[in-house]
Amino acid sequence: MAKSRASVVSSFTIIKGSLIEETYAAFQSWDLSSSKSDNLQRIKSDNAVASKSRNWLRDVAFVLSRRFDPAGRDRPLVELAKAGCDRQVWKPLLLWHMTRDEFLLRDFLTGWLYDRYTDGTYRIRTDDVLPYLQQLGKRRGVEMSGNWSKSTTERVAAALLRMAVDFGLMRGTLVKEFVSYHLPEESFLYLLHAMAAAEPNARKIVDSRDWRMYLMGAADVERELLRLHQYRRLHYQVAGSLAQLDLPCSSPTDYATGPMMGAAP
């Protein structure tokens, strides 16, 4: 697996966008018995993502290579696409997987955008995002990939807001507005399994900043856990600062390949 870019701020992959349909198509045709390089070469030669130009196809392959580890961490996402998982369920999982190494998108959603949401901000323009981008290089532990021009910074700001629209968090064109977002139950359960694989502590799962990508705070997560406990989809108990969470499967892979994640009809 390539070296992690979890703290690298890159403009290229953000400007290329969310690539939801392209990623789904690529993963549907992915051969899990072959290497990533072989799969990407075949996708380019067969145009498996139905690209309208060779340059765009090349860029899509580059972004897929940069964002994902289909043989490892991201294998469940590939298996779900191959099984025909409903896109509305799959799309939030794509967001979680791509933000493992896509630092800028994760930081933007869990920090800047979520704060605007909880502050009651309703409309957001590209110019509103610029101060956030301009201070990134001053933050400890953050590595900027190249020096951005004013034009590049503006393109990244616009692209981040478009991605928020693509993933159903906002709507609009020139001016973006928050929408009433609801994370599908199957997606929520998968994310619980994925988070538990990295952090088994139930309280830390509930408090994870990753939920902010879906405009959810800890209280929202806990309400959903209690609801699913009531319907016996999982076991969740809480007493003060202590919490216990028992999930139906032992790993995100088991959950993704099990009967609970039904394929689209």
Image (spheres, grey):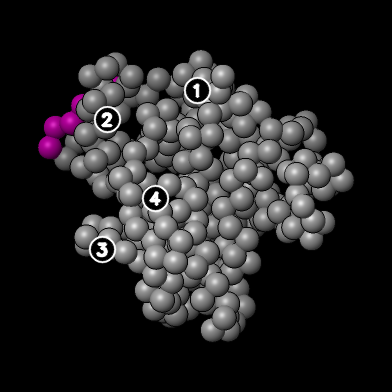
Q: Nearer the viewer, mark 3 or mark 1?
A: 3
**Is residue 205 placed above or below 264 in the rendered structure?**
below
Marks 2 & 3, CB-CB < 8 Å contact: no
Residue that label 2 marks: 225
Q: Residue at 74%, 58% (x, y): give it.
A: 56
Label 4 sits on a secondary structure element that is loop
Label 1 sits on a secondary structure element that is loop
Label 3 sits on a secondary structure element that is loop
Residue that label 4 marks: 169
Q: Three-letter amino acid code at disc 2?
A: Leu
Q: Earlier in the sequence, mark 4 or mark 2?
A: 4
Q: Give the residues drawn in magenta, as a range.
A: 235-240
Disc 4 to disc 3, how far (Cα)? 13 Å
Q: Which mark is residue 261?
A: 1
Q: Three-letter amino acid code at disc 3?
A: Thr
User: In front here: 50 or 12?
Assistant: 50
User: In front here: 205 or 42?
Assistant: 42
Q: Position of residue 166 (x, y in %)?
A: 49, 50
Disc 4 to disc 2, how far (Cα)? 21 Å
Label 2 sits on a secondary structure element that is helix
Q: Nearer the viewer, mark 2 or mark 3?
A: 3
Q: Position of residue 265 (x, y in %)?
A: 56, 19
Disc 4 to disc 1, how far (Cα)? 23 Å
In the image, taking residue 202 as reference, residue 172 lies left or right, namely right
